[in-house]
Image (cartoon, rainbow, N blue to C red):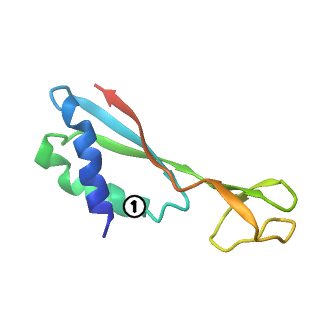
Amino acid sequence: MHELSIVNALLKHVQPYLNRKIKCIKIEVGSMSCIDPERLIGCFDWVKATVGLNDTQLIIDHHPAKASCQQCQQVFTLTQLGQPCPCGSYDYNLLSGQQLTLTEIEFA
């Protein structure tokens, strides 16, 4: 379960702010990032008390994967791995969808 190591890395980034009351932590997770959002929240809820974040909520903003087709130059949304472009081509570049980004720390 790599979600636990992701939560631990996230908490390292939040550590400088632990002297303040944190209401929520917001992150962006791409649909092709191989991260299970429910497990990520579960791991966060499991370990947050160990660093004094009992009342802190983890909010995940899901981002769809986007790709640019090399054949027709269309930018399209990928809903699953191995999906072709609407034109039928599999020759495309992934533009987004693999990100895991800390976007906001909201203080109470």
Q: Position of residue 36 (x, y in %)?
A: 42, 64
Quarter of the view holding residue 12:
top left
The residue located at (23%, 52%) in the rendering is 8
- Give the SS element for disc 1: helix
Residue 44: x, y in percent? 27, 53
Residue 62 percent across, percent down from the top left: 53, 51
Q: Residue furthest bottom?
A: 82
Which residue in the structure is indicated by mark 1? Answer: 38
Q: How many marks?
A: 1
**Residue at image point 76% right, 67% down:** 91
Indicate left or right for 69 with 49 as reference. Answer: right
The structure residue drawn at horizontal position 25% and vertical position 37%, both measured from the top left corner, is 14
Q: Residues within 10 Å of mark 1 (few under 14, many from 20)?
A: few
Q: Position of residue 78 (x, y in %)?
A: 68, 62
Image: 20 above or below 101: above
At 55% from the left and 59% from the top, the residue drawn is 31
Screen quadrant of the C terminus = top left
Specify the amino acid type for callout 1. Glu
Left-right relation of 82 to 13:
right
Q: Is residue 20 left or right of residue 108?
A: left
Task: Indicate the quadrant containing the N terminus: top left, top right, bottom left or bottom right.
Answer: bottom left
- Position of 33 with respect to 16 (left or right) is right
